[in-house]
Amino acid sequence: MPIAAGVQGQVPSTLPAWVKLLDGVRLPVPKVSHDRVQAAINDSRRSMREIAELMQDSPALVLSVMREANHPANASQAQPAESLEIALNRLGLARTSSLLARLPAVPVEDIPPVLRQFQLISQHASQQASGLFASRLARLWQEIHWGSLLFLSPLWPLAVTHPKLLDAWELRVIHKGEDAATVELELFGVRIMQLCQAVAEHWRLSEWVTQGYRLLQEERDQLAKVLNIAREEDALHQQHRLDDEPGLRRWFNQPANTVLLANGLALAAQVGWVNPHLLRWQLLTSLYLQTTLDDVQQQVHQQAAASARQHAGMALFHPAEALIWPWSQRRPHPDMLAPAPPSPQDLDAWRTLCGELLAQPSPFSNAIHLSTHARDALLACGMQRLMLMMPDRATNSLRVQQVAGLPKEALRLNLPIEQSKLLQRLMSQAAQLRLTPDNHAQFSALMPEPLRALFDSQHLLLRSVAVNGQVLMLVLADQGGKPLADVSQQAFGKTVQCIERALAAFGNRNA
């Protein structure tokens, strides 16, 4: 089975379809970890505990072993294995070695970055859980450790098959504050917590994991009551309120809640150290530990630093990095940052290409030759995704001449002009439309569905190019969905002027 059933294909829209898809994904394992564990299994001097410790470097490997051990065909006991060592003893060395042979072992840099980022968050959560709770609940440290590491694991295969959906969710819900339920039903067809719980139950993960998802969905009223108590500044008043509701106190003090608290802290810290989501989890943690908010914040920062020393990876963001930032600064979503302006080398290439577009008489032998130069000039000025289309007068449609940064299938696109009022407007005379977050909802609805799917962006330029009043080309361009850099936007306008003159010269080449 491939690493991902998941080249981004059709998005499931029902819970059973999602569970089936995610269950079929074999997560990639770093080759270094894979080889190290395989060598330890083949070494008769190594104990199961030592092998389990070696596996901890690869969360995907841990999950694969736990899933295999908890599979109905392999689980002799009714209860899921609560620790990796128990899972290894259930499987035995021979079946563990066979499992390793079936897993994709790849260089760490070949593992999808969204998956590596989610696994880093899980490792950070595990560190928070161990540092905050394991010493106080020493007999349960294994349940705390493995439960917190695997709590987000239902999202790991989703990070392989549909990383753009997770990225869109983060941008819209976390950074733009859109309603989570609306966004999730639009993107996934189901609620995220519902999906995670279904996958965790299908994999027979620890009860500590599934209980956290049940709490977030079915016991939110109790959580809200506890948070209200946690907001009390007087510790004695907090205690009195809990004493008045012994059922609520017992519910909140369950050891399994440590897994949810640790993951809440780790996830919220991804955005920044001063945000209301993180404060809520810190308040809940301080109430759980019966200590002050200041003490919890200090411990959480220390555990973040410890996690970064152990788990931080190249090109991944760890919240410990933000501990040295200005205190109120949040980590912006990459799509909210304008890309860097073109380099001096790119601008030199852009000037050369524009000079060739302006050459008289036209140096271009055919329309493809000209549109290739136009595409390269637009790329040199900083555009990252491009589509150049030309009208087919016989069929009154637009055919694609050039693409860049888009799937090759986009070259086969053929759009009837009369079926879109937006295309009719752009093809009637030279015009430019710039999509922004403010007007995106209004104008993207007017775009043909194939274009909307290819340019899933709130920052997009559409420009029709005309010669003697007749539109000869439609240009669509963006910078990978990010806000447009001012320099690139200005250069885009100048490039289109050069393309217009090139088209005019090309039309007059036989005159």
Image (cartoon, rainbow, N blue to C red):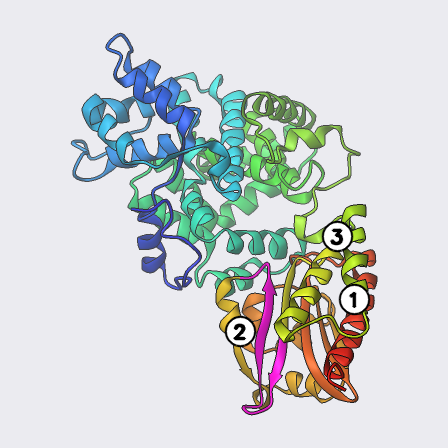
Q: Is residue 456 left or right of residue 427?
A: left
Whole-percent x, y for residue 95 in the image? 20, 28
- Please state which amino acid type lies under the numbered disc 1: Thr
Query: Which portion, as a residue range, is magenta?
Result: 389-406
- Quarter occupied by the C terminus: bottom right
Q: Quadrant of residue 237?
A: top right
Whole-percent x, y for residue 478 in the image? 68, 62
Q: Quadrant of residue 271?
A: top right
Whole-percent x, y for residue 219 in the image? 45, 48
Instruction: Name the residue that disc number 3 marks.
Output: 338
Instruction: Name the residue that disc number 2 marks.
Output: 450
Helix, strand or loop at mark 3 = loop
Query: Quick one: label 1, few (<14), some, or many (20+) residues within 10 Å?
Result: many
- Please state which amino acid type lies under the numbered disc 3: Ala
Tag of residue 495: 1
The mark total stands at: 3
